[in-house]
Image (cartoon, rainbow, N blue to C red):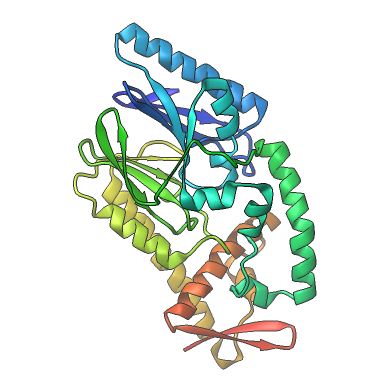
Amino acid sequence: MVEVFPGIFQVTEGASRGVMRPPVNIFIITGPEGLVFDGGYGTRKDVQYFTEKFREVQKECLARGVPFNVTRIMPSHAHPDHFSGLVSLRKKLGLSIILTKSMHDILASREAYRSSYNVEGHIPSKIRNPVVERVSKATLGRIWSFFYEKAYGTDFIPDPDRIIDNQGYIDINGRPWRIIHSPGHSEDHISLYNPGTGVLFAGDNILRSVTTWLGPPKSDLEAYIASLKYIRDLPGLSLILGAHGSPIVNPRERIGEILQWRDERTRQVLDLIRTCGASGVTLREMLDRLYQKKSWFTYRIAEGWILVTLEYLEKQGLVTHRIAGRKVLFTGL
């Protein structure tokens, strides 16, 4: 637990638990009408850990003689390391749950959550054999559901206490904070910005030392770039608090680095496709050329951002694909 800005405390869950359960930040905005931003993991151990830290912050505020009335909690988006703890924290701490309409549509039930990932027509469904695709959806849906429930403590939210719009304002301690719909990492992602202090809660969109994961069907590279440029141009922006890692004290510089990195990676994929000429190149061949002798896990992570990049390049009219037997070949235009 650390105070990252006067009256704002960062609690990090899941430290040193590996890539499948990365450390995740939950922020407590203290004051007479405070708020918890993001819900973290929902296992008994994680919920107990956050509850203890919440009480420590409460005692610290009491010792300072400052108000501590934190009764609300709100996630940045509907990924399991951000919403799984909401229901348990409502029970433990009496926090009312605030969701946007988009988040509620996804998190109302396990069935709604699964169906939100079954998006037809994107490039992965064209690459894989249709029979294998249908079987994998049914099988992997059960496997991932079991994994989330055990590893993340997933709990869905049919009855949030309040549903709000994806954009607008929310009052925190008598100050208006802007709710910014910032899709890219996921279509329901929001950021929270206080123009008076220049503090932005960025969720997963902007991280200090690692790049945000992007992958189908939830991610959209074009939307992600637009969201980053919009946030970069916010007047008075001075501090970014991300859901993973430490605070970003040079926000415009960091956003510029991320945009440059994405541009370089996109150019890398485009150049590779163009060097293959009219014969085209498959996704597997791209992975082999860009990630020689890497681990299976690295391949899976890389596959996501390459697929999102391919969809982006097709939208830009720079790349096209054709089906040749069981292969999907990408060529430059």
Out of 37 and 23, give the one closest to the viewer: 37
Out of 99 and 266, give the one closest to the viewer: 99
**Horizontal and vertical percent for residue 50?**
54, 24
Task: Tell which residue pokes out farthest to the bottom in this image.
Answer: 278
Snapshot quadrant of residue 132: bottom right
> Image point 19% across, 49% down: which residue?
235
Out of 328 and 58, give the one closest to the viewer: 58
Residue 211 in sight from this viewpoint: no
Q: Quadrant of the N terminus?
A: top left
Residue 271 in sight from this viewpoint: yes
Snapshot quadrant of residue 17: top right
Using residue 32 as the reference point, say whether residue 304 is left or right of it: right
Taking 120 as reference, is 243 above or below it? above
How many dots with numbers?
0
Taking 21 as reference, is 144 above or below it? below
**Horizontal and vertical percent for residue 20?**
64, 44
**Horizontal and vertical percent for residue 303?**
61, 64
> Image point 64% across, 53% down: which residue?
112
Out of 145 and 167, give the one closest to the viewer: 167
> Image point 60% across, 47% down: which residue?
108
